[in-house]
Image (cartoon, rainbow, N blue to C red):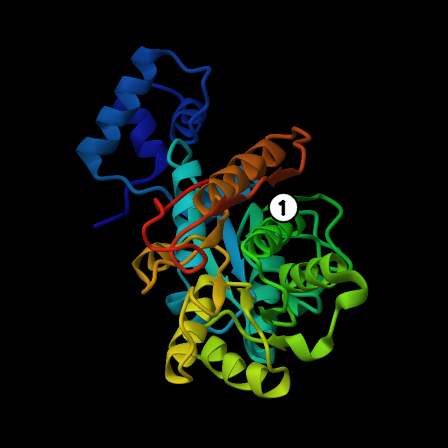
Amino acid sequence: MSRTTINDIAALAGVSKGTVSRVLNGHPRVSERSQEAVWQAVTQTGYRANVHARSLATGRNNAIALLIAAASEQLFNDPTFAELIEGVRDGLLDSDLSLVILMGGSEIEDHRTVSYIKAGHVDGLIHLNPFIDDPITAGLADSALPLVLCGPRPPIPLPRRNWLVTMDDVGGVRQALDHLASRGARTIAMIGGDPRGVSAGIRFQAYRDWLGPNFDPDLFEPGDYGTGSGNVAFGRLPDRRPGIDALFCASDRMAIGALETAYRRGRHVPGDLLVMGFDDHQIAAQADPPLSTIHQPIREIGRTAASTLLAAMAGETPSDKIFPTQLVVRGSTWPQSTPTDSH
């Protein structure tokens, strides 16, 4: 049995082949009567469009790529990625675009991702976690595709058409440290994020700047945003620098790992150690004690990234967007009798 073609649809609907093409591609200048006739013919014949041929005709693939410069275990273990992806999905609900998730993390994966994009399979890009030495982003420096970064711009060549949608890392760090100081903390240590992350570097520099001449490198330990790295980091900090009375972590998961180590070492939170996270994931409110943290609107960042990309793909010139953060005070920095989730 021969495959139904666009010519068959046109003959059955009583319209031209051009009209069928315009209807299938969502062109607005087609009468309702013609649209109805075409869709009836499509339903009657079970016609399926040749997506590749449509792409050649329109120059569009109706797909965008979500780039993740991290190993797959981080994608599935870090709730930040899930919230960002959900936000992007929310922002595309009224569009006909499909999402393609492309991951890096190894030389082979990075090369495969860049090759896939350069082969012309997608119409735009959203990067969920750019690295300072990100080979995916660097490999796309000559791309004409619009790119939206969910984070600060990395210090590497970028495609000419790029925008960022992120939150105020510096402001969030200052909120956390100001709060700890207001609770009487004098020796504030920090567990930082993945050193390759652009935001991680900005948060560390904000911590260093806040301390000024009181900065002590022995008070800082890098992590990878995961619970295990927070556990290990706080196992090292007190041995290297006794007298720590407060701990600021660049993620909630690292803060929870640090809490576990603190309990094993006989530290009482918040009695003799104040602990702050960053993100305000659900796990922060469920910690013991509930974790004070810095709220960042992760899902809203994803939604705004999608709307920014849609505007760029439509030929508009959108603006960068930097969201403010909010301090969330809970039991890890305040007596348990105090109301929680105080913004």
Please tell me how crowded label 1 is: few (under 14), some (14-19), or many (20+) other residues with Cα within 10 Å: some
Q: Disc 1 marks which amino acid?
A: Asp
> Residue at left 45%, top 50%?
84
Task: Work out whether 48 lies above or below 293.
Answer: above
Res 117 → quadrant: bottom right
Q: Nearer the viewer, residue 100 or 199?
A: 199
Q: Nearer the viewer, residue 186 or 253?
A: 186
> Residue at left 76%, top 47%?
160
Where in the figure is residue 2, as x and y percent of width and height? 26, 48
Residue 73 visible in the snapshot = no
Q: Residue furthest right?
A: 213
Q: Residue furthest left?
A: 44
Res 320 → quadrant: top right
Where in the figure is residue 45, as x and y percent of width and height? 21, 36
Secondary structure beneath label 1 = loop
Q: Nearer the viewer, residue 12 or 138?
A: 138
Where in the figure is residue 25, as x and y percent of width and height? 43, 31
Identify the residue position indicated by label 1 in the image.
168
